[in-house]
Each structure stands twice: as structure tokens, then as C-alpha cells.
């Protein structure tokens, strides 16, 4: 079983996997981003245009909003941040995704980390799948330049030929940067601080996304 949610909301979706259903998943669309259906009887989800907040039809990617009885009451001492995160009874997850005609949700990216015409999450998943020696991959969107892949490997080295094969059908990227696990800054909950990495390796923390809903 796979669940997806946020600290502010608890579980929002559930999906049950079997060996047969996993075998049917296409290699270029990792199962972990196919989130399944909203939790029955307690959660509603919709996908909206990030600029107009208008609900989008099935298949159109946009910003995921959630309505759930498990929503937290707010952020301590951060009322303005909470105001930006909510739209009436809905909370803005800050994630980009799409719903199909059956209501199932596919996760595409964090809005703050988005790259035009690509999905950083999809690229990271594919690199992880194709290069077993890579223990972590972080792809940074850099305005005006190709995305920058940051890699952690078990050996501290990267097979250049294997890398070229793994990314041959992916969007063009900058030369990969090798890091150790200790060089990746994280939040208290283990999330990668991409803004810090972007500032360190590109000179600016700004990406393509607005970061308005983080």
C-alpha cells in the first residue's frame, strides 16, 4: 500500500499494489508518483491553474489542492504563511499533478522546484532506477540554464558511459555534480533544502517556481 499526504493534512491518497499491478507500470512512469485515489469519506482533491486558481479538467496538470477534516489549524506565529497556503476550506499542497477521469492522482513536481517542459521528480526517479550505484539524485532547475543533477554514489565515483546511457532520452542537463550524503542540507523532517543547494552551485537560490506555497 502507498499513501501520500503532508504534515498539515495527514494522508490524502491511498493506493494498493499487487505484484501484477506493479508489473504493468510503465518503466518511464515510476509507481511512486501514481498516488491513487483520495482517502474515502475524508478527503477531496482538485487540480487548479496556479495563476487563476480555476479548477482544471481531467488530464490537465496544475496545482493540487486538498480538503480534509484532518487539516491542521495553522502555523504557529506564521499567520501570513498560513493565509497563502489556504483557499477557503482548501489547502494548497504546493505540489503539481494531474487527475485522470477516474479521479486518480499523478504527482509531477513540487511547484517551487518545477522545470519548464520537464519533471524533476520524474528525472530523479528514472536516474535512480537506471543507475543502481546512485543512492540519491537531486535535480535543480536553474533559470536560463539546463537543470543541474547532483548525485550521491556509494563509491564517490560515476561511470561516465553508464551516465550517458541513462540520460540519453532525458531533457538536456548540465554535467553531474558528485556529493557526499553529508553535503546535502536537509530540513528537520529530512527534506532536501534545494534552495541552499541551488545557491551553492549556481549562485542564486531562485528557481523557476514561485515558492509561494512552501
Image (cartoon, rainbow, N blue to C red):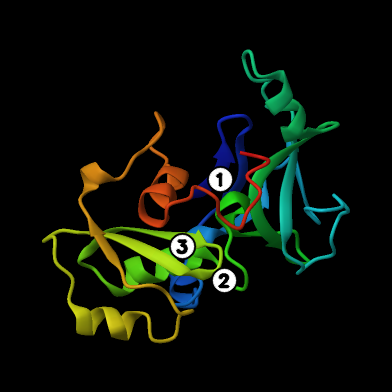
Disc 1 element: strand
Instruction: Place residue 68 in its image quadrant.
Output: top right
Mark 1 vs mark 2: which is more N-terminal?
1
Task: Judge whether 182 appears above or below 115 on screen.
Answer: above
Sequence-wise first label, 1 or 3: 1
Q: Which residue is mark 1?
A: 4
Front in this rendered view, residue 26 or 112: 112
Query: Label 3 belongs to which residue?
Result: 18
Q: CA distance from mark 2 to mark 3?
A: 29 Å
Q: Is residue 12 left or right of residue 172?
A: right
- Residue where numbered disc 2 is placed: 118
Residue at the extreme left of the image, as rendered: 155
Q: Position of residue 43 (x, y in %)?
A: 73, 39
Residue that protrudes farthest toward the top in the picture: 77
Could you say which disc has been placed on residue 44 in the image? none
Residue 89: x and y, percent?
83, 31
Vertical order, 183 against 19 (above or below) = above
> Mark 1–mark 3 contact, CB under 8 Å?
no
For the residue pair 16 and 65, the one nearer the viewer reads as: 65
**Residue 76 versus residue 208: which sits nearer the camera?**
208
Q: Residue at x 51, y 72 (%)?
A: 29
Q: Residue at x 67, y 40 (%)?
A: 213
Q: Is residue 107 rendered to the left or right of residue 71?
A: left
Q: x, y percentage for residue 141?
A: 51, 61
Amino acid at each position: 500500500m502507498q499513501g501520500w499526504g503532508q504534515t498539515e493534512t495527514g494522508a490524502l491518497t491511498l493506493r494498493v499494489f499487487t505484484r501484477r499491478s506493479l508489473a504493468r507500470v510503465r518503466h518511464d512512469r515510476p509507481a511512486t508518483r501514481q498516488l491513487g485515489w483520495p482517502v474515502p469519506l475524508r478527503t477531496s482533491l482538485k487540480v487548479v491553474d496556479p495563476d487563476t486558481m480555476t479548477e482544471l479538467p481531467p488530464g490537465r496538470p496544475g496545482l493540487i489542492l486538498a480538503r480534509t477534516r484532518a487539516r491542521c489549524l495553522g502555523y504557529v506565529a506564521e499567520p501570513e504563511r498560513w493565509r497563502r497556503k489556504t483557499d477557503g476550506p482548501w489547502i494548497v499542497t504546493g505540489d503539481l499533478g494531474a487527475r485522470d477521469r477516474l479521479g486518480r492522482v499523478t504527482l509531477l513536481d513540487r511547484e517551487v522546484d518545477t522545470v519548464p517542459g520537464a519533471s524533476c521528480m520524474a528525472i530523479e526517479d528514472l536516474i535512480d532506477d537506471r543507475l543502481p550505484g546512485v543512492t540519491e539524485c537531486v535535480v535543480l532547475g536553474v533559470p536560463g540554464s539546463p537543470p543541474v543533477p547532483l548525485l550521491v554514489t556509494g563509491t564517490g565515483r560515476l561511470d561516465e558511459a553508464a551516465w550517458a546511457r541513462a540520460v540519453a532520452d532525458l531533457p538536456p542537463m548540465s554535467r553531474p555534480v558528485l556529493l557526499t550524503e553529508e553535503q546535502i542540507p536537509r530540513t528537520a523532517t529530512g527534506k532536501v533544502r534545494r534552495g541552499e543547494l541551488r545557491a551553492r552551485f549556481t549562485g542564486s537560490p531562485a528557481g523557476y517556481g514561485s515558492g509561494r506555497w512552501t
